[in-house]
Image (cartoon, rainbow, N blue to C red):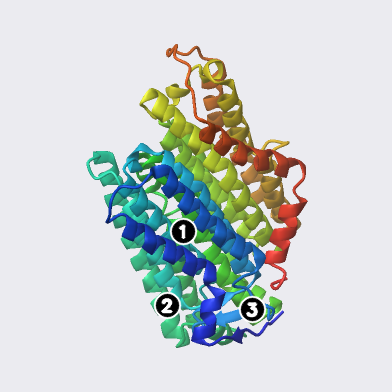
Amino acid sequence: MILNIWQSSNLESLWYILPELLLLGGAFGFLTMSLFTPHNRRNILAWAILILLTSLFMAMSGVGTSAEGRVGLFSGLLVVDAFSMYAKVFFILSSMIASFFFYQSKTFGSTKKLLETLAFLMVLTVGLCWMAMSVDLLMTFISLEMVSILSYLLVASKPKDAFSSEAGLKYILFGAVASGIMLFGLSFLFGMVGASDYAAIARHLQGDLHTTEILVLFFSFICILVGFGFKMTIFPTQMWVPDVYQGAPTSVTAFLSVSSKAGGFLIFMRLLIELKVHLGSGAFESLIAQIKMHEILVFFGVMSMIIGNVSALKQKNLKRLMAYSSIAHAGFILLGLSCLGQDGFFAVLFYLFVYMLMNFGAFYIIHLRVIDTGNDHIDSFRGYGNQNIWMSVSMTIFLLSMIGLPPFSGFIAKFYVFKSLLSQKYYMTALLGGINTAIAVYYYMKIIKWMFLKDGNDPEIPRYGKLARVYVILLLVPVISLGIYWKPLIDWVEASLSFVF
């Protein structure tokens, strides 16, 4: 299927990015407010939710989309289509969930700090949306760096804390190296093709390639995957994850583990989608076979799962355990993407949405226990089941869903990944995925054991406000309901990819 893109003028392009413009306006307003007298923190949260909710409604209702199907913006730098609509809804919803998390965090206790952080969050959300809309190498790099720079600021948001400063420094150094390697690959690709837009690259790659061109393309693909892989948290760029996740504020860790990871996957999917749309199915399959794309993705995915799951087994620190868990989940998602077809792309989008819900939920309850006990080790959950049965059961559901057990949505997400692998007859890859899922049971169940089978040392029963309980319920309901009735999410994901397959 080869589709044409209707190109809008630069002025008309502004209509198609109205949700992003609203977020940028909100960020500017928050930064301006931070210069003046203190404001009520709850009012700040209300304004942030209102801006994000309005942007979410605009994205879901089709404001910034087109009857033409696919529209090129700003002389072909960005594109608006059903896939970009999925990305907008995903990232705005994720930021809305994170904004309440930031509000609850002691790190952002002052009104000035909260205003600045929420402003950064909104601009970062715009960068994430543009990552998934980029159809030009230049815009791809700019949007990715836009997200990276703001992420560095969030990670190092506790300058007086040695762990936070160290985490920020490591994140910057590893990010700079990954960006440099990716830029190297992009420059090789540009040098071979002589153009930066994906459509021109696809036209150049049609037909059989010479051996030299295949080698250059293979090298470029590896370098680009390293840059995207830094965001995905996959092998071999996963070394920074445990230290950064541990040192950053828990709210920032939760946001990075969801949105930054999803940004890496969606920007890579955008590249693959554009190649498939402009090449057609036959030429696309020939291209990925020539550069061994499937084999590379499987190798990186399996290595990510093994490193993540095996390393998580011995962790005592909750945030480090969740960091390695995040690496393992990224590897599992990459296995779905390695199918490079309709089932695989479908599985990735479904998995990312479910992962957002259960991961935010688990991190939020970890955040509450850190506040209760003053430490982020696994023994902080000792006897939690006797102290607060509601939060303990909620945490158990989030963890069981992350394992992939029925009747929760994590089971459906993993089912579709396995389905995509088996439909392509990748039986060994599916077996490795199953083995790693079994390994993950141990360290997730270890947390559950500490909650219900260990006696607590703290006689004081933790009490949480209504907002905390509502927050957990809003995440818990879809985690359960999408495991029982998942058709609405399936329909949305299928619609997001309808122009590709």
Q: Which residue is mark 2?
A: 138
Give residue 431's quadrant in the image.
top right
Instruction: Give me the disc on residue 192.
Output: none
Tell me the residue at 64%/62% (across/down): 60
Q: Residues within 10 Å of mark 3 (few under 14, many from 20)?
A: many
Q: Position of residue 429 (x, y in %)?
A: 64, 51
Which residue is label 1 attached to? 229
Residue at the (51%, 20%) spot, across then down: 384
Instruction: Report the residue marked by disc 3.
Output: 70
Real-space Cα separation, disc 1 to disc 2, in angstroms: 18 Å
Name the kind of residue labelled 2 in the image.
Leu
**Tag nearer the camera, 1 or 2:** 2
Q: Position of residue 7 (x, y in %)?
A: 58, 86
Nearer to us: label 2 or label 3 = 3
| Label 1 CA crowd tier, 10 Å (few <14, some 14–19, many 20+) | many
Is residue 302 at least partly visible in the picture?
A: no
Mark 2 and 3 residues: CB-CB less than 8 Å, in contact?
A: no
Which corner quadrant holds the N terminus?
bottom right
Label pair 1/3, CB-CB below 8 angstroms: no
Q: Nearer the viewer, residue 210 or 263?
A: 263
